Image: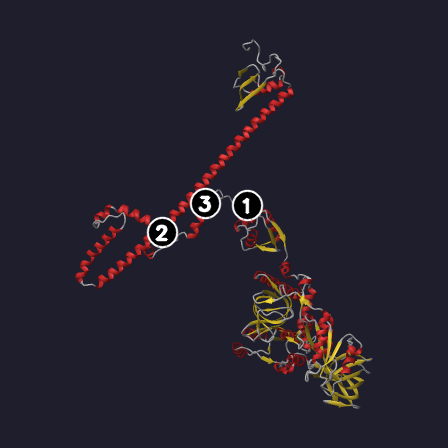
């Protein structure tokens, strides 16, 4: 194809022409329409086929031009052609991106319009519903007003005269017509007849249904509707309607997709209930049961599964299992190290220790300027007392008064374990006694410094130097003997040396540098616990660290509770107790053991879980201690039970420490033949259940500073159960010892009363062998026991069948006389044998 000059256009495979041209191609939907060749002289448009199986393979296509040099325009290199083709492809890509961006923007604008339209519709719907509710409320109020007017009118008609009653209907009809005329949109007219009502019955039914539907949507039920019946039933609440609207609004805004599932760390104990496992995973319990059924386990939600199975279920739901043991529940009360800047000075805890009747409580009375001795039974301290004292110099001291009797060894040990300083009281006229030695050992075991207070120096027989010398035998070297233990001579009666004792305590406390952190959870020790009739379980707690506040939740031993009230040593109610402050704590669910540790926790669930774990651990420990694991142990235990006589008792005391001390003292009563068995011990009054237990076990009930209530006394009288009351521990232990001694078998003692030598043996018909004897020593009696000795070896022991002097039966034969003896069921006697004659005597034994 040539132009007017007879030359071929550039780019169609002709000559070069000496001029360069520019090739432009336009693609639409993969089809090439035109190739425009522009030159300096003219512009020629050559049409190209728009159809074909493959545009790249059509003649003169860009691909064919690039691949065939003969079809490339003249003067254009292959590299230039590739560059142009790439530019063309980039232009097409930009055009496609622009189209896609425009389409996305248009879609976003359309979605925004839809969202705004949905919001507008939702607001309009809410407005319509609000207006409808207001309209229905106004109609309901108008209806109620009309009903009230009608009721008043009927009441007036009943009281009116007969003539007025006949005129009342016409007047009521007129008023009703006037009321209808006053309504907007309602024309006044004559009353409808029954025929009219029948004709418009369908319309009335439709209106009634519409009104019932409107009343149902309001969610309110009037008295008239309830009596008339109708739909009634349970209607949707306002909260349900709001939830429905929120759901519809979220759906309209495109927020109805489900929340992404959360994967959790599930704490897994040794065994776990299926429902609890589902709760910890935040999964539905039926889904967990289905998963277990797929594993071949037919379980319900209340059954327990082992940890391995539970771990498989947890992994199937996509969670992570964290193995924990039962003991991990106590990790919440693990002690935290306090920072040095948080520590503050605290008062020292001073324990008064020593032998009984050495004046410990009297010395503390002088310091407290109180009189505690007057309230003690028998003049001895039965409980641990905790007091706080402010000295004349302003120093604050906390004192613990521990009993001195040997039965309270464990109580003194608890006193030494919670104390900072021990004041050892020794009477100047009595020197060192056994309980004084025990107090020294407790103080050394606790690793606390000791101050020796030599009391009763005002007595004429006082010898303080002898006390210092006796203490040397127990490795206690006082300062007066060039030692490091302070010693102070005091008199609780006259007050002499009290100031020096307080100075010594203050000096020792200053050396110790006692510090604690009051701004943390409280940690304390139970000094004493009791069951009060009006207040319930009460524990005397000595706070060792932190501050115990009213309302704190705590766990103490196997019990837990919430601090209901705090009472100090003066009987005053306080709101909190800091370090080294003794208080009575109310609000425990049970009576704790004296010496238990009190820890404050965050929640009641934690406290209850820790207490349950400790109870179960104590049960397991008792079961393991009482179980026999081998046949030999079982046989030995059975044999021991048969051979040992037991005296069962039931012990009730006023406080926990006294009960423990009595039980420990009673356990020491007895020997290998008899022992005292404490069936039950507790704190509080003697109850009917205690009497029932004592009756079943044929045991007495021991009451220490407590009494039986009225039902228990009546039950004891009917069942014949003995109840004994004591206020001094000496009398209690002595009586139990006497009772246990009655179970001991009497001791049999042998008294040798004579010897006889066999001179000759005779054979007597019907009697057997008879020994002709000479009584060489003592006397021979027929009722006595005899032993036959041959070469000083006992070959027979038994009784005499006959004792004769000549031919007569006699009761006894004196020394130097001859007699005849025959043994019961024994004939092997020989000449020269010796007969030992003895009598048995039973002696009552005592513990």
The residue most toward the top is 6
Q: Secondary structure at mark 1?
A: loop
Q: CA distance from mark 3 to mark 1?
A: 20 Å
Of the two numbered discs 2 and 3 in the rendering, the one whose residue sits closer to the viewer: 2
Q: Secondary structure at mark 2?
A: helix
Q: Secondary structure at mark 3?
A: helix
The residue most toward the left is 163
Image height of 61 relative to 552, above or below:
above
Image position, residue 363 (x, y; %): 68, 80
Of the two numbered discs 1 and 2 in the rendering, the one whose residue sits closer to the viewer: 2
The image quarter in which residue 506 lies: bottom right
Image position, residue 480 (x, y; %): 78, 79
Q: CA distance from mark 1 to mark 2?
A: 41 Å
Q: Number of labelled discs?
A: 3
| Quadrant in the picture for the N terminus | top right
Q: Earlier in the sequence, mark 1 or mark 2?
A: 2
Q: Earlier in the sequence, mark 3 or mark 1?
A: 3
Q: Residue at x 60, y 25 (%)?
A: 87
- Residue highlighted by disc 1: 260
Q: Which mark is residue 134?
A: 2
Query: Badge 1: few (under 14), some or many (20 or more) residues near its Cα, within 10 Å?
Result: few
- Residue highlighted by disc 3: 249
The image quarter in which residue 93 lies: top right
Q: CA distance from mark 2 to mark 3?
A: 23 Å
Q: Earlier in the sequence, mark 2 or mark 3?
A: 2
């Amino acid at each position: 194809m040539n132009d007017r000059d007879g030359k071929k256009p550039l780019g169609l495979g002709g000559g070069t022409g000496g001029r360069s041209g520019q090739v432009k191609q336009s693609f639409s939907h993969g089809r090439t329409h035109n190739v425009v060749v522009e030159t300096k002289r003219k512009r020629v448009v050559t049409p190209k086929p728009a159809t074909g199986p493959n545009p790249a393979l059509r003649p003169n296509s860009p691909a064919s031009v690039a691949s065939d040099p003969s079809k490339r325009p003249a003067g254009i290199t292959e590299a230039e052609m590739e560059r142009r083709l790439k530019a063309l492809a980039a232009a097409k890509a930009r055009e496609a991106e622009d189209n896609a961006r425009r389409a996305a923007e248009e879609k976003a604008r359309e979605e925004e319009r839809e969202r705004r339209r949905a919001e507008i519709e939702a607001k309009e719907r809410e407005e319509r519903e609000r207006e409808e509710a207001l309209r229905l409320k106004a109609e309901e109020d108008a209806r109620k007003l009309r009903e009230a007017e009608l009721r008043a009118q009927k009441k007036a008609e009943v009281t009116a005269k007969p003539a007025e009653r006949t005129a009342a209907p016409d007047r009521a009809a007129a008023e009703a017509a006037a009321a209808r005329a006053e309504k907007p949109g309602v024309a006044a007219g004559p009353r409808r007849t029954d025929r009219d009502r029948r004709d418009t019955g369908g319309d009335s039914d439709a209106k009634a249904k519409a009104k019932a539907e409107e009343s149902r949507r309001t969610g309110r039920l009037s008295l008239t509707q309830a009596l008339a019946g109708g739909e009634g039933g349970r209607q949707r609440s306002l909260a349900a309607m709001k939830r429905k609207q929120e759901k519809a609004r979220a759906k309209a805004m495109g927020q109805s997709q489900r929340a992404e599932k959360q994967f959790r760390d599930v704490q897994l104990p040794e065994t776990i209930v299926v429902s609890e496992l589902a709760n910890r995973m935040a999964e539905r319990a039926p889904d967990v049961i289905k998963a277990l059924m797929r594993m071949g386990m037919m379980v319900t939600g209340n059954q327990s599964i082992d940890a391995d199975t539970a771990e498989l279920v947890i992994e199937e739901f996509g969670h992570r299992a964290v193995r924990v043991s039962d003991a991990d529940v106590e990790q919440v009360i693990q002690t935290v190290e306090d920072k040095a800047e948080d520590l503050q000075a605290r008062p020292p805890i001073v324990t008064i220790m020593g032998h009984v009747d050495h004046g410990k409580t009297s010395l503390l009375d002088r310091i407290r300027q109180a009189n505690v001795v007057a309230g003690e039974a028998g003049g001895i301290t039965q409980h641990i007392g905790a007091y706080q004292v402010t000295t004349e110099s302003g120093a604050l001291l906390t004192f613990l008064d521990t009993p001195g009797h040997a039965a309270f060894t464990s109580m003194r040990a608890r006193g030494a374990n919670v104390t900072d300083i021990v004041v050892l009281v020794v009477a100047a006229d009595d020197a060192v006694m056994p309980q004084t030695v025990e107090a020294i050992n407790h103080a050394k075991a606790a690793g606390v410094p000791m101050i020796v207070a030599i009391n009763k120096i005002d007595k004429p027989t006082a010898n303080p130097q002898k006390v210092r010398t006796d203490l040397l035998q127990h490795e206690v070297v006082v300062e007066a003997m060039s030692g490091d233990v302070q010693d102070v001579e005091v008199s609780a009666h006259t007050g002499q040396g009290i100031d020096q004792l307080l100075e010594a305590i203050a000096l020792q406390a200053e050396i110790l540098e006692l510090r604690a952190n009051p701004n943390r959870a409280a940690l304390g020790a139970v000094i004493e616990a009791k069951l009060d009739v009006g207040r319930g379980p009460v524990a005397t707690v000595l706070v060792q660290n932190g501050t115990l506040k009213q309302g704190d939740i705590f766990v103490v031993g196997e019990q837990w509770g919430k601090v209901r009230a705090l009472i100090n040593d003066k009987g005053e109610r306080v709101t909190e107790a800091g370090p080294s402050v003794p208080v009575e704590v109310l609000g425990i669910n049970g009576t704790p053991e004296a010496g238990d540790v009190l820890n404050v926790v965050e929640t009641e669930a934690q406290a209850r879980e820790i207490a349950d774990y400790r109870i179960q651990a104590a049960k397991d420990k008792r079961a393991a201690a009482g179980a026999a694991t081998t046949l030999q142990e079982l046989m030995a235990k059975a044999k021991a039970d048969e051979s040992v006589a037991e005296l069962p008792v039931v012990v009730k005391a006023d406080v926990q420490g006294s009960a423990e001390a009595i039980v420990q003292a009673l356990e020491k009563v007895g020997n290998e033949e008899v022992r005292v068995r404490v069936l039950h011990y507790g704190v509080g009054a003697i109850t009917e259940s205690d009497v029932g237990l004592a009756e079943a076990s044929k045991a007495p009930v021991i009451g220490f500073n407590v009494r039986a209530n009225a039902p228990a006394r009546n039950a004891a009288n009917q069942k014949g159960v003995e109840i004994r009351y004591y206020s001094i521990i000496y009398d209690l232990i002595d009586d139990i010892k006497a009772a246990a001694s009655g179970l001991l078998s009497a001791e049999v003692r042998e008294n040798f009363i004579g010897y006889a030598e066999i001179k000759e043996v005779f054979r007597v018909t019907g009697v057997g062998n008879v020994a002709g004897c000479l009584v060489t020593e003592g006397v021979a009696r027929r009722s006595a026991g005899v032993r036959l000795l041959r070469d000083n070896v006992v070959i027979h022991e038994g009784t005499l069948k006959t004792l004769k002097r000549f031919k007569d039966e006699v009761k006894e034969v004196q020394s130097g006389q001859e007699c005849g003896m025959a043994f019961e069921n024994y004939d092997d006697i020989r000449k020269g044998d010796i007969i030992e004659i003895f009598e048995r005597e039973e002696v009552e034994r005592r513990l």
